[in-house]
């Protein structure tokens, strides 16, 4: 049932083509599962973001912010209120002696930024090649791969808080941790980040990127919908390794399966529901705890309501 009041409020401030009603979230997540969002707003400018935040605050409507949905699982009941997707694609660069600063909109895919860096003969983003998310999502969760993470290159981030106010924070103020940052602990819309990089050797940069790509293709089940690594690594153990040692590779519930290629991945074999995936996550956690004593924690974000 569409909330006409909220829809009309959105129409007053947001372009109609940017508003989707009862939008299936499986279209906006890499798991390709999940129920409908009451309203889905694609924000291609700051004005749309501020307008959506204003409506959410004034009308007391729940607001959920997503990026590319590559680290997100939406429950089958969908999401009440407004889902806001910032799709800001600004890009600029400046040179300071031997340093290069990229200013990147939060909606830019990190893989695209890494390709620009290759063309510019700029190093520091090789690890990001192949990561499917946007810059905003990568900053929020301190995304990383192959021994590097966003924490090492983020110089500054500008964001808008719930009241529509703009703020900028430096690297230290991000409070980066493993797969975590200050943005994991508060609701804010990341607008852009400045990345501090440096000149490098193009052949060496390209070599690293290609090596990373080969490793991904060989070791990850990229042919199936997933949200990447389902679980965080342990402080003194490799999570995928202990899941494998527990004999869980290939174990499935409904259409959700522990990948036979990489035990750290839960995949959608084609007909999974969010409930299948959540039930499988819970089963894995219980089995690992019972057999090894280790507690494992999800890396993916689970949002929305049950049916």
Image (cartoon, helix red, strand yellow):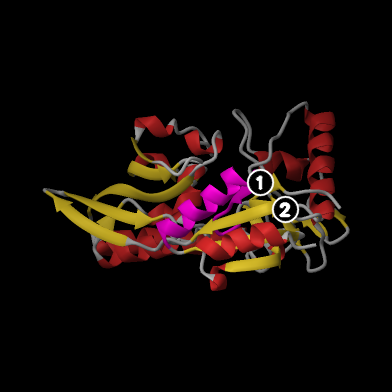
Tally the marks: 2
Above or below, 191 relative to 14: above
Above or below, 205 relative to 54: below
**Mark 1 touching mark 2, by CB under 8 A?**
yes
**Left or right: 205 with respect to 93?**
right
Q: Nearer the viewer, residue 138 or 79?
A: 79
Q: Magenta part of the protein: which range? A: 45-69
Residue occupied by mark 2: 79
Residue occupied by mark 1: 62
- The outermost residue toward the left is 97
Q: CA distance from mark 1 to mark 2?
A: 9 Å
Q: Nearer the viewer, residue 280 or 65?
A: 65
Q: Secondary structure at mark 1?
A: loop
Q: Is residue 72 magenta?
A: no
Q: Position of residue 298 (x, y in %)?
A: 68, 40
Instruction: Please identify the quarter of the rendering in which residue 10 is found.
Output: bottom right
Q: Which quarter shows the N terminus?
A: bottom right
């Amino acid at each position: 049932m569409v909330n006409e009041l909220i829809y009309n409020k959105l129409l007053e401030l947001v372009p109609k083509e940017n508003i989707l009603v009862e939008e299936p979230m499986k279209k906006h997540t890499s798991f390709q599962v999940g129920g409908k969002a009451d309203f889905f707003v694609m924000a291609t400018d700051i004005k749309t973001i501020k307008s959506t935040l204003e409506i959410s605050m004034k009308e007391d409507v729940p607001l959920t912010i997503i990026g590319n949905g590559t680290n997100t699982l939406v429950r089958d009941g969908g999401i009440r209120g407004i889902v806001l997707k910032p799709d800001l694609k600004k890009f600029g660069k400046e040179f300071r002696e031997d340093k290069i600063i990229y200013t990147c909109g939060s909606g830019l895919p990190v893989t695209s930024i890494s390709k620009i860096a290759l063309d510019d003969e700029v190093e520091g983003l090789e690890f990001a090649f192949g990561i499917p998310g946007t810059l905003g999502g990568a900053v929020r969760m301190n995304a990383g791969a192959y021994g590097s993470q966003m924490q090492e290159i983020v110089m500054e981030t500008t964001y808008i808080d719930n009241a529509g106010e703009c703020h900028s924070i430096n690297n230290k103020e991000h409070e980066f941790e493993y797969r975590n940052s200050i943005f994991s602990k508060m609701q804010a819309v990341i607008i852009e980040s400045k990345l501090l990089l440096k000149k490098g050797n193009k052949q060496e940069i390209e070599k690293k990127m290609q090596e990373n790509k080969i490793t991904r293709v060989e070791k990850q089940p990229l042919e199936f919908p997933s949200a990447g690594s389902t679980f965080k690594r342990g402080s003194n153990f490799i999570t995928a390794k202990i899941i494998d040692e527990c004999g869980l590779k290939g174990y499935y519930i409904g259409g959700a399966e522990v990948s036979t290629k990489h035990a750290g991945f839960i995949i959608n074999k084609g007909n999974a529901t969010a409930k299948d995936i959540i039930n499988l996550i819970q089963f894995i956690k219980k089995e690992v705890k019972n057999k090894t004593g280790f507690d494992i924690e999800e890396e993916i974000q689970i949002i929305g309501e049950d049916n």
